[in-house]
């Protein structure tokens, strides 16, 4: 047991810490805060679920579901038998199928997780909703606006079914905490955002089977892929727009094949500049040619800049910014010549548990776990609109698919309001 | 036929992969997927990443049974088996001891008697309860902490090799930090992948050249992370039974069909400082006054070059292994 002898002492320092950390506490924006006991008590039956598509993301979903006790992974679907063999390692004894319709025909399965290539999401999602299944679909939702719209319409027309898009930041306590923090005015006037995703890899997949290899390399096929900005950028652009509560009115893009000139048509290096409402610029940069500085996001304003790296946040204050008070007690981390103030979600809860509120939560989970936890909670307490709803997923699909057009064409594209109509 | 070389930092070391074949983009794609698998495993096995499976277990398992995904549960079972095979010389629960000796920080220090006693009370696989039916793990004592440092790299190599084989790769060599490696097939210009094992004190001369093909080699050494106190050098490999850094051997190498097994066994060999029945090995013991500058015990891995007076193979500890002893 932890020594709680001093937990109740309300020293001046503790008082200051507790009172001043309140703005950082993770207020859950759209999902109820539920204790573990209460959660279990309200689940009538185990959720019987199937994962459709057992590539890396499908495997992560399956592994994560084993840590959510209210779900039984009943089936795995993949068109490739190697993946079904892997499924037996990840979930021994699980039923496996090559055709997702077999899962949809099973009345015992209430829920499907769709983790197939993006361009295959639509038909599976529509069929799943028609079959009365709750749907979790990985982000991006689709690779064409028509597909995304068809999915959003089907989700809208089935309000008794849960439809959640895999935009994980929407469920993550650190992002929710920063959302509240930015909304409370921490940046001052927002002036710009910048995100990058840098890695060095070909983005190609290998298979001993030629036909399978073509199917696996859908990301490199411009006929079905909306490129880096849709497949990767979605997860970074969504939090920026969410935090600032703005939509882009235009995007200018540039894309090149700088290193992997192996016959592909999809650029390996892209830049996009979004103009948000009120004129705030948002820069996005992704490359498969260099891993330098990996991935991060910054949100800048008159008073401070907030940076996300590895799902953790820091604030860098301007010298002339007003004092907030609590930052005196916060943990500081050095980034070359800058000093970042660590933004810790649920700081007051940690403090109450005698865990240092300046350190990261030792019970931190993966972003996927939070997203799946939200989705499964919705089975017991919903259906209510998930944080990553069909509207959010559709809007993001429109934004990134049009941005990909701008990247490929090297041009500027306006976002007409009509594009966002479901 | 061409050669593709790839590398990635993971698990605090450099993983390097050499692939040979006709289609270089295809080889690169297969290699990249294998290295991504290693990164994924690091995210699960690292005790330093707060959202990893291992961090979650270490934080919660003394208070409740923690559900573990099937592949990790299998690794826990394998680790328990290897613990028994090595008479406790391989042990996942060395975390508190590593902490007490300061090896999780930048340097290291000799712990006080009380600190060491406390850490030893928190060490031992008997404190790790595995529930096969519910696939959970629970600690019998607060403060127990798993550390996959002695098997994680090998496990990652095994899983990466699985990815390469599934993709159809027939010639490849993968190592993690030059200590744990696996060879798929043979290289274009030889019948096997030949690995030089060097004495850390004189790295220019190999003490053995080990030929591997479709098998793993692991080398553990006390060099690397270490500190000196009162004229004594303390290395980061601990004897979990004594709670102290190992002293009996400088280096140990072994060959196995599994890199995870090789990884764990080479650590155990370093702890025992003598061969284990059922495992090919080569061990370098430290200098002893009046004896040769180093003593090499070989048990299925021949020293190189062979000394003029060929040493007999060293007898092996029986351990609890039921494996059939190798044949030379």
Image (tube, grey):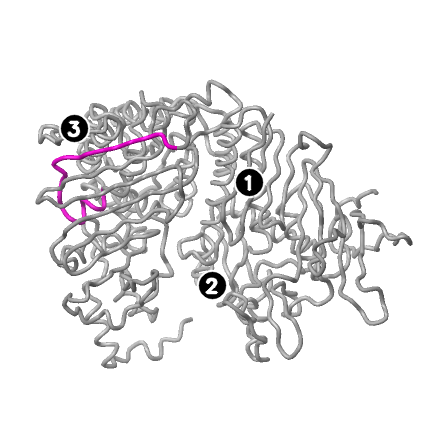
Q: Quadrant of the C terminus of chain B?
A: top right
Subunit ID for the residue under disc 2: B
Name the residue rendered at 61%, 47% in the picture.
B260
**Secondary element type, mark 3:** loop
Q: Position of residue A151 (x, y in %)?
A: 22, 27
Q: Looking at the image, which is closer to me, B22 or A393?
A: B22
Viewed as shown, does residue A14 lie left or right of B230? left
Q: Which mark is residue B62?
A: 2
Q: Which mark is residue A157?
A: 3
Q: State which mark lies toward you, 1 or 3.
A: 1
Viewed as shown, does residue B245 lie left or right of B61? right
Same chain for labels 3 and 2? Say yes or no. no
Subunit ID for the residue under disc 1: B
Q: Earlier in the sequence, mark 1 or mark 2?
A: 2
Q: Mark 1 to mark 3: distance in Å?
A: 44 Å
Give neighbour class at mark 2: few <14, some 14-19, many 20+ (Cα, 10 Å).
many
**Secondary element type, mark 1:** helix
Q: Quadrant of residue B1?
A: top right
Looking at this view, name the residue that lies furthest to the top: A211
Q: Tell me: residue B226, above or below residue A283.
A: below
Q: Does the CB distance between marks 3 and 2 fall below 8 Å?
A: no
Q: Looking at the image, which is closer to me, B225 or A9?
A: B225
Q: Which residue is mark 1?
A: B159
Chain part drawn in magenta: A238-258
């Amino acid at each position: 047991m932890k020594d709680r002898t001093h937990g109740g002492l309300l020293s001046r320092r503790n008082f200051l810490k507790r009172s001043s950390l309140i703005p950082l506490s993770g207020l859950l924006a759209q999902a109820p805060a539920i204790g573990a006991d209460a959660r279990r008590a309200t689940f009538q039956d185990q959720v019987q679920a199937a994962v459709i598509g057992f590539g890396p993301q499908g495997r992560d979903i399956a592994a994560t579901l084993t840590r959510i006790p209210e779900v039984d992974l009943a089936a795995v679907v993949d068109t490739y038998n190697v993946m079904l063999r892997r499924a037996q390692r990840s979930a021994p004894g699980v039923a496996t199928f090559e055709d997702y319709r077999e899962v949809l025909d099973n009345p015992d399965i209430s829920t499907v997780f769709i983790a197939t290539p993006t361009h295959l999401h639509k038909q599976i999602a529509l069929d799943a909703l028609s079959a009365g299944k709750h749907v979790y679909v990985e982000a991006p939702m689709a690779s064409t606006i028509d597909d995304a719209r068809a999915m959003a319409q089907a989700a809208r027309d089935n309000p008794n079914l849960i439809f959640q898009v895999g935009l994980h930041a929407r469920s993550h306590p650190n992002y929710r905490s920063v959302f509240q923090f930015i909304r409370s005015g921490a940046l001052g006037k927002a002036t710009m955002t910048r995100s990058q995703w840098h890695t060095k890899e070909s983005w190609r997949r290998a298979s001993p089977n030629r036909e399978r290899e073509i199917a696996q390399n859908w990301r490199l096929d411009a006929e079905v892929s909306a490129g880096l900005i849709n497949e990767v950028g979605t997860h970074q652009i969504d939090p920026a727009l969410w935090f600032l509560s703005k939509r882009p009115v235009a995007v200018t893009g540039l894309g090149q094949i700088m290193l992997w000139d192996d016959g592909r048509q999809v650029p390996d290096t892209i830049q996009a500049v979004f103009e948000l409402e009120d004129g705030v610029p948002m820069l996005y940069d992704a490359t498969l040619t260099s891993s330098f500085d990996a991935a991060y996001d910054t949100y800048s304003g008159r008073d401070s800049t907030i940076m996300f790296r590895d799902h953790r946040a820091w604030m860098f204050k301007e010298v002339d910014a007003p004092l907030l008070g609590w930052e005196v007690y916060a943990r500081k981390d050095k980034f070359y010549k800058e000093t970042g103030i660590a933004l810790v979600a649920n700081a007051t809860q940690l403090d109450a548990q005698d865990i240092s509120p300046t350190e990261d939560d030792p019970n931190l989970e993966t972003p996927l776990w939070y997203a799946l936890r939200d989705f499964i909670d919705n089975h017991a307490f919903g259906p209510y609109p998930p944080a990553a709803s069909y509207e959010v997923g559709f809007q993001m699909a429109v934004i990134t698919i049009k941005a990909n057009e701008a990247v490929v064409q090297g041009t500027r594209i306006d976002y007409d309001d009509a594009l966002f109509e479901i | 036929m061409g050669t593709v070389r790839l590398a990635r930092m993971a698990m605090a070391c450099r993983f390097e992969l050499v692939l040979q074949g006709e289609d270089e983009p295809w080889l690169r794609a297969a290699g990249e997927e294998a290295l991504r698998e290693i990164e994924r495993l690091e995210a699960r096995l690292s005790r330093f990443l707060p959202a990893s499976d291992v961090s979650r277990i270490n934080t919660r398992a003394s208070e409740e049974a923690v559900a573990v995904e099937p592949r990790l549960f299998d690794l826990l079972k394998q680790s328990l088996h290897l613990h028994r095979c090595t008479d406790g010389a391989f042990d996942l629960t060395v975390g508190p001891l590593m902490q007490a000796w300061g090896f999780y920080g930048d340097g290291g220090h000799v712990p006080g008697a009380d600190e060491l006693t406390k850490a030893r009370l928190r060490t031992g696989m008997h404190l790790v309860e595995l529930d096969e039916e519910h696939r959970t793990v629970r600690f019998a004592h607060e403060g127990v902490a798993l550390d996959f440092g002695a098997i994680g790299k090998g496990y990652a190599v095994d899983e990466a090799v699985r990815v390469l084989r599934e993709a159809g790769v027939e010639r490849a060599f993968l190592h993690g930090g030059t200590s744990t490696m696996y060879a798929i097939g043979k290289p274009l210009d030889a019948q096997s992948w030949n690995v030089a094992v060097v004495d850390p004190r004189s790295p220019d001369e190999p003490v053995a050249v080990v030929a591997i093909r479709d098998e793993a080699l692991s080398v553990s050494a006390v060099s690397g992370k270490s500190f000196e106190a009162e004229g004594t050098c303390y290395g980061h490999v601990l004897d979990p039974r004594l709670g102290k850094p190992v002293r009996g051997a400088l280096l140990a190498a072994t060959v196995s069909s599994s890199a995870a097994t090789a990884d764990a066994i080479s650590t155990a060999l370093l702890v025992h400082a003598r061969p284990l029945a059922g495992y090919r090995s080569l061990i370098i013991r430290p200098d002893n006054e009046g004896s040769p500058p180093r003593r090499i015990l070989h048990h299925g891995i021949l020293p190189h070059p062979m000394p003029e007076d060929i040493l007999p193979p060293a007898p092996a500890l029986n351990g609890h292994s039921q494996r059939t002893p190798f044949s030379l």
